[in-house]
Image (cartoon, rainbow, N blue to C red):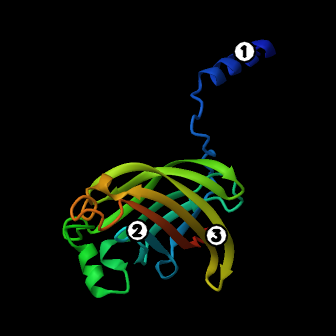
Amino acid sequence: MKIPAFIALSVATLLLAASPARQDGAAPASASAANITLDPVHSMAVFRIQHLGAGYFWGRFNELAGKIQWPLDDSAAPSFDVTAQVNKVDTGSEKLDGNLQGPNFFNQAEFPTITFKSKSAKKLGERHYAVTGDLTLRGVTKSIEVDCTVTGVGKAPTGQKVGVECAFTVNRADYGMKWGIDAPKGALGSEVKMVIALEGDVAKAKE
C-alpha cells in the first residue's frame, strides 16, 4: 500500500525532531577520513615554563607516536590519539632531563607515557579546529581544549603526508606536579604552554 506523501513527510519531521542535536559544533564524522600514522622523526611536543619568575625555560618531547584521522578535503574534524614517552624529554641537559623524569615532575618510573585522545571538535575556520579531548599525565586524566591547525598536505616518495600544529596551556599542579610552586616557592611557574608539531603518513587506499 502506498503511503500518502503528507504522512511520510510528517513521520520524517518527527524523526528529525527526536534526533539529539550536536551541542559542540563538531563537524560530523566522515567515512572518507584518511588514516594518518605519525612520523616520529618529524613529530614533537615543545613546552615552556617560567623559571624563578624571570625567563622562560624550554624543553621538548621527541618522537611522538600515534594516529590522526582526517578527510583530506577538510569536510570533517580531525581526531587524535597521540602518545609521548617521558624518556624522550629533551632539554639539552642530561641533568635536567633526569630531574624531569624523576618523581618531582613526570615520574617516569610510575607513569612512562603522556597521552592525548580527542573526543570532539568545533570548526573555527578552514583547516582550523578547537579540539576537546582527554590529556593523561602522571596518571591523572583531565579534559582540555586544544587549538589545532592542519598546516599542509604534501607528498613524499612514499606517499602523502599531513602536518598539524596544536597549542594549549595547562596548570601542572592539576596533574600533581607541584614542585617549585609553593616549595621552594616561585622556583618554577605553574602554567605550562605546549606546542605540538605533528606530521604523519597517509595510509594508501587498498586496491
Q: Which amino acid does label 1 sit on?
A: Ser
Q: Earlier in the sequence, mark 3 or mark 2?
A: 2
| Residue drawn 42% across the image and 59% down it | 116
Dot 2, how many residues are within 10 Å of its Cα: few (below 14), some (14-19), or many (20+)?
some
Q: Where is residue 192 in the image (x, y as percent from the top left)?
A: 41, 63
Q: Position of residue 67 (x, y in %)?
A: 49, 65
**Label 1 SS:** helix
Looking at the rendered image, the quarter that the N terminus falls into is top right
User: Cα distance, mark 1 to mark 3?
Assistant: 43 Å
Q: Which amino acid does label 2 sit on?
A: Ile
Q: Mark 2 points at which residue?
A: 49
Q: In this view, does 191 lie to the left or right of 121?
A: left
Q: From the viewer's perspective, is the residue at label 1 or at label 3 nearer?
A: 1
Q: From the viewer's perspective, is the residue at label 3 or at label 2 nearer?
A: 2
Q: Mark 3 points at which residue?
A: 207
Q: Position of residue 37 (x, y in %)?
A: 51, 70
| Residue drawn 48% across the image and 82% down it | 41
**Label 3 SS:** loop
User: Cα distance, mark 3 to mark 2?
Assistant: 48 Å
